[in-house]
Image: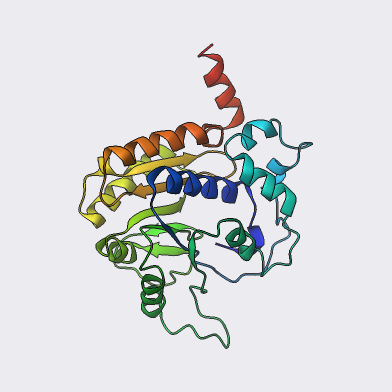
Amino acid sequence: MQDAYVGDIGDFGKLTLLDHLAKDTGLSVGVVWHLVCEPARTNDGRHRSYLDANLEPDPKLVRSCNPQLFDKFTELGFFRPVGHRVSMLQEIFTDFTYFGELCHKTPGGEFKSRLDWIARARKHLAGSELIFFDPDNGIRFGKNKKALRKHVHEDELRAFWEDGKSLLIYHHLGRAKHEVDIAEIQNKLAITCGISASDIFDFHFRRGTGRVYYFVPNPNSNRIRHAVETAKAKLEPLLWPLADWRKKHMQRI
């Protein structure tokens, strides 16, 4: 998570997903921002055009996914100085509990170690049932635990899972075939948590950059499956590129 890019189409999608899952499952939500401190780039805001009626081909379609959040994002405009934008998101969803410490060392900072950081996160979110992880790049598997500032490691996810938490995890997709990557990571997550891959649900967002969110309920149930189906139906305009969504719905007519 980077403060400079708060409010883009990715934020709208992930918070809409989290909002729907929280309401439909009744689970209390804790958020691990995986906040990193990096200088803003010149292309800051390039994925906020969905809020501009002059640039977004069908703003009403995007808004339909979560009208209240869309209107709030439009109202805010994200003109608050960089370094203070994540707090804007936290002011919208006040029922969530947030862990927003930087997940890496900075000059003069108090960061001691990644193990210390994740231990504080677990303690801070002990009262939450569904934990959302928002690393810049996604999940890392295996023995390599170096330079984790933009990842969440499978051992960290396992620790929360063993605490009895349900998990929602962001993962950035590369340029390879997304379906192959999604299935591979889903299988690895199943091994990490000691469950069947069929008990893990993926939400593949195709608007903006390719991204996927893995929902790992603990435990699974018919109520959870219904909540997932409901969320996917509500999020459909964000799960497909606009042209593909229109084509798909024209075929239904």
Q: Is residue 195 above or below residue 234?
A: below
Q: Is residue 19 above or below residue 101?
A: above
User: Could you say where residue 166 lies in the image, as x and y percent from the top left?
Assistant: 33, 54
| Side of 117 relative to 86 (left or right) | left
Looking at the rendering, which quadrant does residue 87 occupy?
Answer: bottom right
| Depth order, front residue of 25/81 | 25
User: Could you say where residue 224 lies in the image, as x and y percent from the top left?
Assistant: 33, 41
- Identity of the residue drawn at 44% across and 85% down: 112
User: Could you say where residue 73 lies in the image, as x and y percent from the top left?
Assistant: 68, 50
| Depth order, front residue of 3/38 | 3
- Identity of the residue drawn at 75% across and 41% down: 52
Q: Is residue 100 above or below residue 9?
A: below
User: Could you say where residue 83 lies in the image, as x and y percent from the top left?
Assistant: 66, 70
Residue at far top of view: 253
Q: Look at the image and tell me whether residue 174 can be seen.
A: no
Q: How many marks?
A: 0
| Side of 153 relative to 70 (left or right) | left
Q: Quadrant of the N terminus?
A: bottom right
Residue at far bottom of view: 108
| Depth order, front residue of 188/31 | 31
Q: Quadrant of the C terminus?
A: top right
| Side of 35 relative to 223 (left or right) | right
| Colouring of the image | rainbow
Looking at the rendering, which quadrant does residue 41 occupy?
Answer: bottom right
Looking at the rendering, which quadrant does residue 93 occupy?
Answer: bottom right
- Identity of the residue drawn at 55% across and 69% down: 36
| Depth order, front residue of 47/20 | 20
Q: Is residue 131 above or below residue 121?
A: above
Q: Look at the image and tell me whether residue 219 can be seen.
A: yes
